[in-house]
Structures are given as C-alpha cells and as structure tokens.
Image: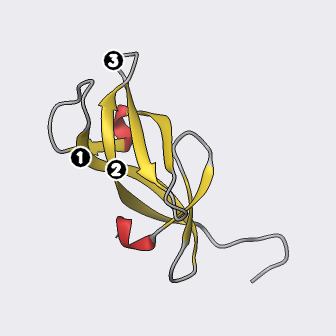
Amino acid sequence: MQKGTQMAAQRGNMSCNLYQGAFSGEAVFEVTTASGDSYQGIAPKHYVKPSAELSKTPVSGAVFVRVVKNGGKEATVTMPDGQTIEVNPSHIEMIE
C-alpha cells in the first residue's frame, strides 16, 4: 500500500427501528449500540429500507452504514448522520 492511502470502508445495512422524520425526505433511525444503549439519528430516506410505510410508531428495517472496523464481537460503523458508533456485527448485513 502506498503511503497516504487507506483501505475503503465496507458497506452494510444494519437492522434498526425506523420512524417518519420531520420532513418528507428523511427518516429517523434507532439502533442498539454494543454497550446496549439506544442511538437515534436522522437519515435521508434513500439510506433506509423500511419493512412497511414509515410512521410515528416504530417500523423494523435497515439503515445504510459504512463499516470502518469489524473486530469480531464489536464493529465500528459510521452512520448516515456522520456519527461513528460501536455495534454488534450480527446486526449488519454486508453489501458486496
């Protein structure tokens, strides 16, 4: 690898709960972190895959993430809102 280059992050869809956002083009996602805490953020609708139409009540689905590191029991992912969190890798379906 040349100096100054880095490997590209892998892509994945992570299971989550989804809600309708305040604006028509956004969704609110809620995921569980590796420590068991809840993390909520906002994503454009093209970053989520709901199992049903979004509403104010939770709908199961998936949110697009970038997997920065996968260490076996914990994975570091970058969420659509730019935050980086630690999650259980079993919640991520990798995209080829």
Q: Which residue is mark 1?
A: 60
Disc 2 residue crowd, few under 14, some 14–19, many 20+, Cα 10 Å: many
The residue sitting at 62% across, 46% down in the picture is 83
Label 1 crowd (10 A; few <14 / some 14-19 / many >=20): some
Residue shown at the point (42%, 50%) measured from the top left: 31
Give the quarter of the image for residue 53.
Answer: top left
* Element marked by disc 3: loop
Residue 55, compared with residue 9, is above or below; it is above
Q: Determine whether label 3 and label 1 are within 8 Å by CB.
A: no
Q: Does residue 59 appear left or right of residue 28 in this picture? A: left
CA separation in Å, label 2 and label 1: 6 Å
Q: In the image, residue 58 lies at what x, y percent? A: 26, 36
**Can you identify the residue that label 3 sits on?**
24
Mark 3 nearby-residue class (10 Å; few <14, some 14–19, many ≥20): few
Q: Which residue is mark 2?
A: 16
Secondary structure under the numbered disc 2 in the rendered image: strand
Q: Nearer the viewer, residue 66 or 85?
A: 85
Answer whether residue 50 is visible to the viewer in this image: yes
Q: Residue at x 23, y 25 (%)?
A: 55
User: Mark 3 near mark 2, Cβ–Cβ under 8 Å?
Assistant: no
Drawn side of residue 91 relative to residue 88, left or right: left
